[in-house]
């Protein structure tokens, strides 16, 4: 019996399952799948990003200048479409990571050399973005056929052994230095001109500002004098109003004090009245009401005790009366039942006579025989004497029991005159 296995993988790998139940291989990324050993086969392949160093040394450009370029590319197995992933599994499923990186690096280096040969050193040096985009586009199309996806490509180092790049740098440095010196002279001249103009404007602004300050100071002094006059008048009015308001306030305070004294006295009277009422209620709650409650409780208990005694006496009397009537009724019923029984038995004996006696005999016979046998079984020892011709032992004892039983009808006949043997034969 083949036990199934549950295969799991993270989002950075792919499981390829083939065999029984699959006409086409199943590819699982970041999930799980059930597999049956010996019936199915499975392989894992990493989807991690590969950082590759693409170095091209001594490559001749369009001008015939040999240069060395080192680029860095980020490449991974493509999962954008199932067909592309299936293509990658077809090419790299059983290859190691190192083998895959060698193949990709070789492909990228070939495209990098081709682009370098079609461009000048100036274009590569000044417009690296254009070079990066050309290599990225060409490599992406080629590696896509292998199931790979190029995430990025950029130049890291650019150098040459003949000094071409250094010469370009020196020429450009000289141009920059020249432009810098010329710019510095023009900047100083412009600075002096602008400084003179700024000083002229500053003096104009300063004189205008001084005039405005003097005018504002004059207006301020005029307005201040007017305001001071108004302030003094208002102050005199305020002093008189303050004295008047102070007198009114003192009078009002005195009236308020008198009202406070009256209110305090009224409050004391109210408090005393409340205290008297509280004392009355306290006496009522602690003395009068408990006394009345205790009186009512004792009256209720006495009344209940009286009723209980009366009811118990009446109950006992009624119980004795009913008990006597019940006993009398039971005795009467029992006597009537015994009389009726005796009457019916007498009537039965009159009607059946010998048959009734026979019935009594037959009912009593087992008891008689059982009593005789019981008496004999209780004997501790029995001694038998044989005359020579009679049996001895258990047979003799059984015969004795039968003889006692057969003598009973004769005894009944002698005592009652009823012949049981004759009655049995007639029956």
Image (cartoon, helix red, strand yellow):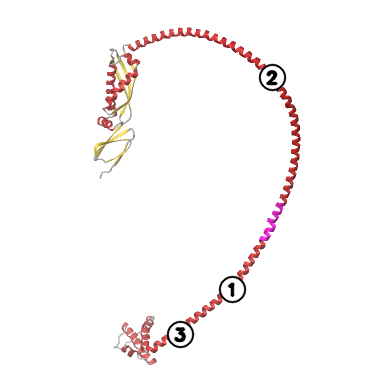
Please say whether residue 287 is one of the residues in the magenta stretch: yes
Looking at the image, is mark 3 or mark 2 nearer the viewer? 2
Q: Quadrant of residue 261?
A: top right
Q: Residues within 10 Å of mark 3 (few under 14, many from 20)?
A: few
Quadrant of the rendered structure where residue 107 is?
Answer: top left
Residue indicated by mark 1: 314
Where is 70 relative to 82, above or below? above
How far, Cα to Cα, is label 3 from label 2?
A: 152 Å
- Dot 3 lies on which element? helix
Q: In the displayed structure, does residue 166 sit left or right of residue 245? A: left
> Does 218 sit above or below residue 333?
above
At 29% across and 20% down in the image, what residue appears?
Answer: 112
**Position of 211 compared to 148: left or right?**
right
Residue 95: percent from the left, percent from the top? 26, 30
> Which of pointers 2 and 1 lies earlier in the amino acid sequence?
2
- The quadrant in which residue 71 appears is top left
Q: 134 above or below 290?
A: above
Decide: is 272 above or below 91.
Answer: below
> Which residue is at a point 32% across and 90% down the rendered structure image?
422
């Amino acid at each position: 019996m083949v036990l199934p296995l549950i295969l799991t993988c993270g989002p950075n790998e792919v499981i390829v399952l083939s065999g029984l139940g699959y006409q086409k291989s199943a590819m699982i990324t970041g999930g799980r799948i059930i597999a049956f050993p010996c019936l199915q086969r499975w392989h894992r392949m990493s989807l991690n990003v590969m950082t590759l160093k693409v170095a091209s040394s001594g490559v001749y450009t369009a001008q015939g200048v040999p240069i060395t370029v080192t680029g860095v590319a980020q490449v991974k197995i493509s999962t954008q479409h199932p067909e592309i992933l299936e293509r990658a599994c077809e090419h790299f499923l059983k290859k190691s990571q190192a083998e895959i990186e060698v193949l990709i690096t070789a492909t990228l280096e070939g495209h990098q050399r081709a682009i370098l040969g079609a461009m000048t050193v100036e274009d590569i040096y000044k417009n690296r973005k254009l070079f990066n985009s050309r290599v990225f586009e060409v490599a992406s199309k080629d590696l896509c056929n292998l199931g790979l996806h190029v995430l990025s490509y950029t130049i890291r180092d650019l150098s040459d052994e003949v000094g071409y790049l250094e010469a370009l740098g020196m020429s450009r440095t000289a141009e920059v230095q020249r432009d810098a010196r010329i710019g510095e002279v023009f900047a100083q001249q412009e600075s002096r001109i602008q400084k003179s103009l700024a000083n002229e404007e500053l003096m104009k602004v300063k004189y205008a500002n001084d005039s405005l300050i003097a005018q504002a100071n004059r207006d301020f002094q005029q307005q201040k004098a007017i305001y001071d006059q108004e302030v003094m008048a208002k102050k005199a009015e305020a002093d008189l109003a303050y004295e008047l308001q102070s007198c009114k306030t003192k009078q009002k305070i005195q009236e308020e004090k008198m009202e406070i004294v009256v209110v305090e006295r009224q409050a004391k009277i109210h408090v005393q009245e409340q205290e008297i009422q509280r004392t009355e209620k306290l006496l009522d709650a602690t003395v009068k009401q408990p006394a009345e409650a205790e009186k009512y409780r004792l009256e209720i208990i006495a009344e209940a005790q009286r009723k209980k005694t009366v009811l118990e006496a009446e109950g006992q009397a009624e119980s004795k009366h009913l008990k006597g009537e019940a006993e009398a009724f039971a005795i009467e019923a029992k006597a009537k039942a015994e009389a009726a029984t005796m009457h019916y038995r007498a009537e039965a004996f009159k009607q059946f006579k010998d048959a009734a006696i026979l019935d009594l005999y037959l009912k009593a016979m087992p008891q008689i025989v059982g009593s005789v046998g019981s008496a004999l079984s209780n004997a501790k020892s029995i001694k038998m004497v044989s005359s020579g011709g009679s049996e001895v032992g258990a047979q003799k004892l059984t015969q004795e029991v039968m003889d006692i039983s057969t003598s009973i009808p004769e005894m009944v006949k002698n005592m009652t005159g009823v012949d049981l043997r004759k009655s049995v034969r007639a029956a």
